[in-house]
Image: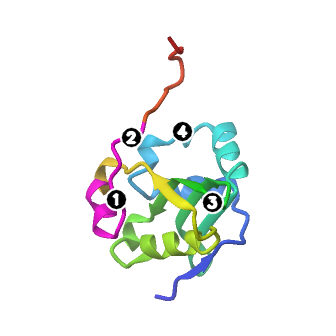
Amino acid sequence: MSIVYKTDVSLTVEQFIDVLSRTSLGPRRPLDDLECMSAMIANANLVATAWDGELLVGVARCVTDFAYACYMSELAVDENYQRRGIGKELIRHARSRLGPRCRLRLLAAPDAADYYGHIGFVHSPRCWELTPGVELK
């Protein structure tokens, strides 16, 4: 297996949906909403990808200012390719594009909650979320 990592490739929405459908993130993403999925990939300003030939097997999708904060909204690896270091390598490739003071933040999927601490992330209890339909008080 020779996985190639890239941060300079524009993904199609079909590729993005396909790789997410082969991960545990698929059920928690609006894969059937083409408009939303298109916007998710079009508006990300840092995307790292992992390829096995022509097959997209992993993606790290981020929104960042490249200097202080980076939010990784997806780290997804095809279930048939997991436990090979692809997720860590996607994180490394994304971080290589960030400034030296930039912090990388993410929310862990339930199946991956223990993974991030194991590879060096520090848990922060300070995350807050305002979901659609909830008004500010």
Identify the element where label 1 is drawn.
Answer: loop
Identify the element where label 3 is drawn.
Answer: helix
The label nearer to you, 3 versus 1, is: 1
Q: How is the image coloured?
A: rainbow
The percent position of residue 62, horizontal first and vertical second, equals: 59, 56
Identify the element where label 2 is drawn.
Answer: loop
Counting residues from the start of the chain, the first of labels 4 and 1 encountered is: 4
Q: Amino acid at mark 1?
A: Val
Q: Residue at x 39, y 78 (%)?
A: 85
Q: Amino acid at mark 3?
A: Gln
The region drawn magenta spans 113-127
The percent position of residue 123, horizontal first and vertical second, equals: 32, 53
Q: Is residue 1 above or below residue 8?
A: below
Q: Amino acid at mark 2?
A: Arg
Dominant secondary structure, magenta: loop
Name the residue beneath numbered marker 4.
Answer: 30
The image quadrant that residue 39 belongs to is: top right
Name the residue beneath numbered marker 2.
Answer: 126
Counting residues from the start of the chain, the first of labels 3 and 1 encountered is: 3
Name the residue beneath numbered marker 3.
Answer: 15
Q: Residue at x 72, y 72 (%)?
A: 8
Residue 116 is a magenta residue:
yes
Name the residue beneath numbered marker 1.
Answer: 122
Counting residues from the start of the chain, the first of labels 4 and 2 encountered is: 4
